[in-house]
Amino acid sequence: MNNITHLLEEQIIKRLVSDNPWWLSDVIPEYYSNMPHRAYLTDFYNEVADIDMRRAVILMGPRRVGKTVMIFHAIEQLLKSGVVGKKIIYISIDTPIYNNLSLENLFLYARMALKAEEETDGFYVFFDEIQYLKDWEVHLKSLVDTYKQDKFVGSGSAAAALKMKSNESGAGRFTDFMLPPLTFKEYICFNKQEKLIVPSKGNISPLDTIDIDALNELFINYINYGGYPEVVFSEKIRQNPGQYIKNDIIDKVLLRDLPSLYGISDIQELNRLFVHIAFRSGNEFSYENLSCESGIRKDTIRKYLEYLEAAFLIKVVNKIDMNAKHLKKVMSFKIYLTNPSLRCALFSPVNENDDMLGSMVETAIFSQWIQGGKSDFFYANWTKGREKGEVDLVWVSSATQKAYSAAEIKWTDRFARNPTELKSLINFINVNKGLRKIIVTTKTETGIYHLDGGENILFVPSALYSLWIVDHLFNQKRKGS
């Protein structure tokens, strides 16, 4: 071994020792231990700790949502469960000194640092920012097949690339785990405002609040700044969210991740389309009007929408008619940002009197469903003679192809006081008999309106409904449904 190679190995080993302080102390750095846990930690930890399942875990998600922090919290849980610190290895692939090293070589160097080169059983190995290694999926698959008594975890911010390569090469070897931006409930917990939420004493919503005005203020702040943990904790970032979110999150995805993954040559065209969509989040679009307004060809727009959706920046919601039937030809659809604070970063914060607040409330509520892993919903839109109608959210059974639930998203108490004004919704209910749950959100009021057909419309404040969605989805997951 020449001197240069020996020196390089020494530096690699020193870096590994520095990045794995629990080898000496059995605790993670205080910086990470003091951070609040994401609500997804328990589910992620269970995947990591399941050594009987011979699969690597791929932790993916948008940039800056806390993936590295959650890895350290999972390591903390492993240590508390009795796993010896020297059996846990953390390696950040974007570290320059690891350039061009295979995953297996890095695993070997870590064991050299531990003076355990001959040991190959019982390790938990975390490869952070794994997308920086070319053909990472081939390397990781080989490790899973070779070291059957070890658990491997990969994480990365290029969600679209990770998902595509995981599906292509990791069938039967990888388990994907998506970490989305913060839910509204997590935002409340991170701000230590849980005291505002109490169990409901009524039969409308399972949750209530001791101060709806304070909760609504938090909800508007969440819409503007609530998607990313670092924004929650930094007043400096909140003063200039565009600098942080746009430059560090949006631009890196639009200008780097997606072009390199899909071979996009005109990155400004992609950026122009995204800005156009972000400004109108929650609106109905068509390929025709998108093409006219953006100057981009329709077939290119189709591809761009797929790419933006794969990158977890937008969600396309398809349309059904008044009878809850899918349209044979997709002519129009709605598009939502997966995180409302993306719009704030591109333009400006919304306030109580902003004309755009209604559509951003709708975007925030949709994002709770999307971030909880649910996307089996549609919106209804129809024209019958001179009558036009729309319902914001409709759930349709895949088995019966019939609607079973519906919701209208409002940021006003007007309809709770005058329910008969909900003409489109009531018409939809009358055509689609037997809907199990019908919700109309409000700004502050809660109530029930009984229809002649026996159905009940539940009125729930938008902020409370957002919290209810998250609880519902997590409870469903716990029950395995």
Image (tube, rainbow, N blue to C red):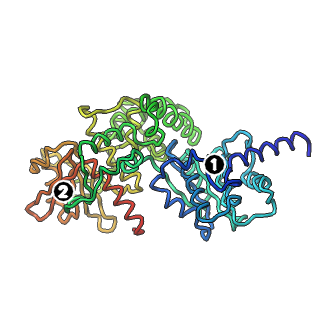
Q: How many marks?
A: 2
Front residue of 293/242: it is 242
**Quarter of the rendering containing residue 137:** bottom right
Q: Residues within 10 Å of mark 2 (few under 14, many from 20)?
A: many
- As drawn, which residue projects farthest toward the right? 2
As helix, strand or loop, the secondary structure at mark 2 comes to: strand
Is residue 358 visible in this depiction of the protein? yes
Residue 251 appears at what percent x and percent y?
51, 33
- Residue type marked 2: Leu
- The residue wearing badge 1 is 130
Front residue of 129/284: it is 129
- The residue wearing badge 2 is 458
Residue 106 appears at what percent x and percent y?
74, 51
**Quarter of the rendering containing residue 5:** top right
Residue 31 appears at what percent x and percent y?
57, 44
Q: Is residue 476 left or right of residue 409?
A: right
